[in-house]
Image (spheres, rainbow, N blue to C red):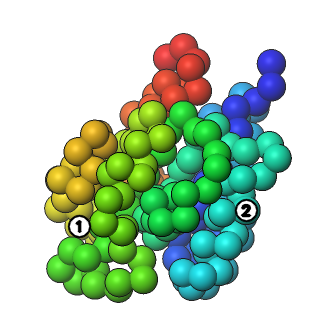
Amino acid sequence: MRPIRVLFAHAAGHTPNDPPLPRLRRALGPGFQIDAPDLGAPDPAVWTSKLSAALTAPRAPSILVGHSLGGSELLRVIATHHPRFSAAGFVGLGVPLWGMPDWPYEAFMLPDGAAKALSGLDRIVFFGSADDDVVDPSHLPAWRDRLPRARTVETHGNGHIFDRGAIAPVLLELRRMAGMPK
């Protein structure tokens, strides 16, 4: 059986080798192949180019995972540039909703009509930890308001990086999206 392809977009100031990716790789095992381009410093034009290329690669991903800015940028790229790809869903870890108080950077905001533009994703699930010291948990209900068909899950003890605490709910969701048994 071929592994399930996953595209992982890292957070600002991180690289593909930083948490939470190593933990996800270990926990998911060989049934998942996680591709994680090095996006570099936060630059909307550069990240758009790199994420668009990854989404439309000949062996495109089946599942999208984004941590923090990587998650919001994956959704913005899809909603704004409409790359041709097919994925079972999106899982976001500690993803900020740009435009909320203290998150004003317009270049990272989703466009109007984002909910419709993201309708090609079968599932959209946001995980946020109650002890996240970077992205306040108030972003979870704000995501539900912005993308009504998105599901949000508040976890406890994961911090912003999801490098600690239980990640079983995240793994279960990724396996569901892959059509695997629990």
The amino acid at mark 2 is Ala
Above or below residue 76? Residue 141 is: above
Residue at the (73%, 62%) spot, across then down: 53
Q: Secondary structure at mark 2?
A: helix
Residue 140 percent across, percent down from the top left: 23, 54
Above or below residue 131? Residue 126 is: above
- Of marks 1 and 2, which one's residue comes earlier in the chain? 2
Say left or right for 106 vs 170: left
Find disc 1 in the rendering and name its residue: 136
Q: Nearer the viewer, mark 1 or mark 2?
A: 2
Q: How many marks?
A: 2
Label 1 crowd bin: few (<14), some (14–19), many (20+), radius 10 Å: some
90 vs 12, nearest the viewer: 90
145 vs 170, nearest the viewer: 145
Q: Secondary structure at mark 1?
A: loop
Whether pointer 1 and pointer 2 mark residues with C-beta atoms closer than 8 Å, the reply is no
The amino acid at mark 1 is Asp
Residue at the (48%, 41%) spot, across then down: 120
Say left or right for 141 vs 55: left
Residue at the (30%, 66%) spot, across then down: 112
173 vs 165, nearest the viewer: 173
Residue 41 percent across, percent down from the top left: 61, 84
Find disc 2 in the rendering and name its residue: 53
Residue 90 percent across, percent down from the top left: 48, 45
Q: Is residue 124 visible?
A: yes
User: The N terminus is located in which quarter?
Assistant: top right
Q: Is residue 130 visible?
A: no
Residue at the (72%, 53%) spot, across then down: 56
